[in-house]
Image (spheres, rainbow, N blue to C red):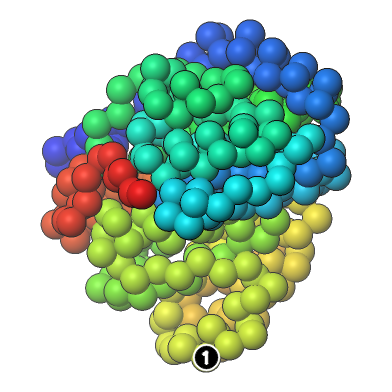
Amino acid sequence: MTTTQTQMRREVLEIPVAVNNLLQRGGDDIRRAADAMRARKPSFMVSVARGSSDHVATYLKYVSELLTGTPIASIGPSIASIYNRKLNLDGSVCLSVSQSGKSPDIVEMARMARDGGALSIAMTNNPDSPLAQVADHTLNLHAGTEISVAATKTFVNSAVAGIWLLAEWAEDDALRAAIHDLPSKLETAVGIDWPEARAALGSRNSIFCLGRGPAYAISNEAALKFKETCQIHAESYSSAEVLHGPVSIVDLGFPVIALASADEAETALASVADEIASKGATVFATSTKVRNATGLAVARTGHPLTDPITLIASFYAMVEQVAASRGINPDAPRHLKKVTETV
C-alpha cells in the first residue's frame, strides 16, 4: 500500500465519476456525430492518434470491425505534417484522438483528412483546441482536469466516447446498455489492484503484456504504462504472435500479464498463457480458463466489447502501486511532460 496518495492514484479513483460525467453530458454531441456517420455510410474509416490515444484507436478498430464490419486503418500523422502528402479519403470517416488536441502533427493530419473528403470527428478533452477547430464534429471527453503525466481517466473516457459513438451509429441497444452501466462496474474495477501480480514482479525489469482482439489494445496501453511510470521494459504482443519468436527470451520467473475479455478470443489467449507458464514464466491472466497460469480478479461488464475498459482501470490501479513500491513518482516520469507536441 502507498503511504502518500499520488495524483495518478487520485485520478484512477476518479475514473467512475469521469465516465459518469461523460455519459451525463456527452450524449447530444455523440448522437449528432453518429447521425452524420449513418448518413455518410462509410465503407472504411481511418484513425489519427499517438501514444495512449493511439491505443484507444486500436481498441476502436476492433470494436468497429466486430460490431459493424467496417474496417479502420491507422494513418501515420507524418504523411501530412512531414511528407506533405494528400490522401484520397472521399466517403470515409476520420477519427482523431488527442487528449490535449494540441499536437501539430495530429491537427495537420485531421485537417488533411477532412480536405481529402473524410467526415472528421475529433475526440479530445479540450473542445477549444486546434484539433477541434479542424473537425466536423468534436466529442468532448468531459474527463475533468488531468494533472498526472500518465493518462488514465482521459484514456478511459476516450475509449468510452469512441465505443459509445460506434454503438449509437450501429443502434446496438445491448452495447448501449453496457456502456451506461460502466460507472458501477468501474467502481469495482478501480478497487482491484492485482497484489499477486505486483508481488511477482519483484525486481524484474522486463515483462510481456498479452492480449487478443479489443484487449490487445489494452495490452499496448499496459506496456506503455509500465515503461513510463515504472521504468520497466515492457513489450505488448498479441497472444497469436508471442510464440513466433519473442517467447525465446522467457526464462524462469519471467513475468507475463495476459489481458482477456470474456469473448471468443479468451480460450485461445488462455491456452497461450498456459503454454508460456509451462516454460517457467510467471504468468497471470484475467481469465478463469487458465490452468498453469494464475487467474486475476476482474470486473466483468456483461458485454465483451466493454470488458477492456474495466481491465485497464484495474491495471492502472496496479501499476501505480508498482511505481510507488520502486520509489518512482508516477506523476512525473523522467524525460516526459504532460503534453507532447510533435510535428
Q: In the image, is 170 to the left or to the right of 285? A: right
Quadrant of residue 191 within the rendered picture: top left
Q: Which residue lies at the image location 56% right of the left edge and 13% below the top edge?
A: 26
Is the residue 57 above or below the residue 275 in the image? Answer: above
Q: Residue at x 63, y 8 (%)?
A: 28
Question: Would you place residue 315 above or below residue 91 in this image?
Answer: below
Q: Which residue is mark 1?
A: 248
Q: Splitting the image into 4 quarters, where does residue 323 fall?
A: bottom left
Residue 69, horizontal then vertical, whole percent: 85, 44
Total numbered labels placed on residues in the image: 1
Which residue lies at the image location 81% right of the left edge and 26% below the top edge? 40
**Residue type for callout 1:** Ser
Q: Please state which of residues 108 and 275 is positioned toward the viewer in this rendering.
A: 108
Residue drawn 40% across and 26% down? 130
Image location (x, y in percent) of residue 210 = 57, 65
Q: Is residue 148 visible?
A: yes
**For residue 294, side relative to residue 305 (left or right):** left
Circle 1 residues within 10 Å: few <14, some 14–19, many ≥20: few
Instruction: Residue 143 in the image: state x and y as whole percent.
Output: 42, 23
Give the x, y percent position of residue 133. Answer: 47, 21
Query: Which image quadrant is residue 231 in?
Result: bottom left
Q: Can residue 16 be seen here?
A: no
- Nearer-the-camera pick, 168 or 207: 168
Q: Helix, strand, or loop for circle 1?
A: helix
Q: Is residue 194 left or right of residue 229?
A: right
Viewer-proximal residue among 324 and 131: 131
